[in-house]
Image (cartoon, helix red, strand yellow):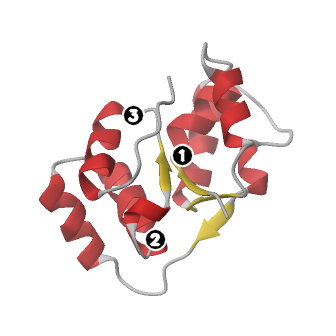
C-alpha cells in the first residue's frame, strides 16, 4: 500500500490552482492512502478564508486523520534534533513519525522547502514535487 502524509502546503497549492497544482494533484491521486494531522483542516480553512474562497467539497474530505492517543514528546524531540521548523510544521512532522513505524515507509508530501529538509533528515523519502 502506497501511503503519504500530506502537509497543508500541498492542498493549498491545488485549491488555489498554483502552477504545479495539476501535476501535484495527479501525483497525489497515485497514493492508496493520504493521511494528515487534523491540524490540516484548520490550516486549510484558514487559507481559504484569507483568500476569500467559499464552500464546496475540499481536498480534506477524503483525508485519513492521524489522531495520536498520547503526547508526541519523543517525536517532537526527534524532529527538533534534526533542525528547526515552525510549530505547525513541527506538529505535522511529529505526527508523521507517530504514524510511520519507519520513516522510509511513508512519503512526507510538502511544498515547504525547510520542512522537506527536516523530513529528509528524519529519513522520510523526498519525492520531487516541483
Disc on the earlier residue, 2 or 3: 2
Query: Looking at the rendering, in which quadrant would you find the N terminus?
Result: bottom right
Q: Residues within 10 Å of mark 2 (few under 14, many from 20)?
A: some
- Seen at 42% across and 74% down, the residue is 98
Label 2 to label 3: alpha-carbon separation = 20 Å
Coordinates of residue 11 in the picture (x, y in percent): 62, 37
Question: CB atoms at circles 2 and 3 under 8 Å apart?
Answer: no
- Seen at 33% across and 77% down, the residue is 72
Residue under numbered circle 1: 43
Q: Secondary structure at mark 2?
A: loop
Label 1 to label 3: alpha-carbon separation = 14 Å
Coordinates of residue 94 in the picture (x, y in percent): 36, 65
> Which is more foreground, mark 1 or mark 3?
3
Label 1 to label 2: alpha-carbon separation = 22 Å
Coordinates of residue 108 in the picture (x, y in percent): 46, 50
Disc on the earlier residue, 1 or 2: 1
Residue under numbered circle 2: 100
Q: Secondary structure at mark 1?
A: helix
Left or right of residue 82, residue 48 in this image? right
**Quarter of image, res 66:** bottom right
| Relative depth, front residue between 110 and 38 | 110
Question: CB atoms at circles 1 and 3 under 8 Å apart?
Answer: no
* Image: 65 above or below 114: below
Left or right of residue 102, residue 43 in this image? right
Q: Residues within 10 Å of mark 3 (few under 14, many from 20)?
A: few
Left or right of residue 100, residue 65 in this image? right
Q: Residues within 10 Å of mark 1 (few under 14, many from 20)?
A: some
Q: Which mark is residue 112?
A: 3
* Image: 103 above or below 20: below
Amino acid at each position: 500500500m502506497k501511503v503519504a502524509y500530506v502537509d497543508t502546503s500541498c492542498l493549498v497549492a491545488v485549491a488555489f490552482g498554483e502552477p504545479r497544482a495539476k501535476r501535484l494533484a495527479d501525483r497525489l491521486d497515485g497514493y492508496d492512502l493520504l493521511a494528515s494531522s487534523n491540524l490540516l483542516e484548520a490550516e486549510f480553512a484558514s487559507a481559504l478564508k484569507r483568500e476569500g474562497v467559499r464552500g464546496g467539497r475540499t481536498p480534506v474530505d477524503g483525508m485519513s486523520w492521524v489522531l495520536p492517543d498520547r503526547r508526541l514528546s519523543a517525536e517532537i524531540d526527534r524532529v527538533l534534533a534534526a533542525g528547526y521548523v515552525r510549530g505547525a510544521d513541527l506538529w505535522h512532522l511529529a505526527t508523521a513519525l507517530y504514524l510511520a513505524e519507519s520513516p522510509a515507509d511513508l512519503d512526507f508530501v510538502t511544498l515547504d522547502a525547510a520542512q522537506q529538509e527536516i523530513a529528509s533528515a528524519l529519513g522520510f523519502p523526498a519525492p520531487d514535487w516541483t
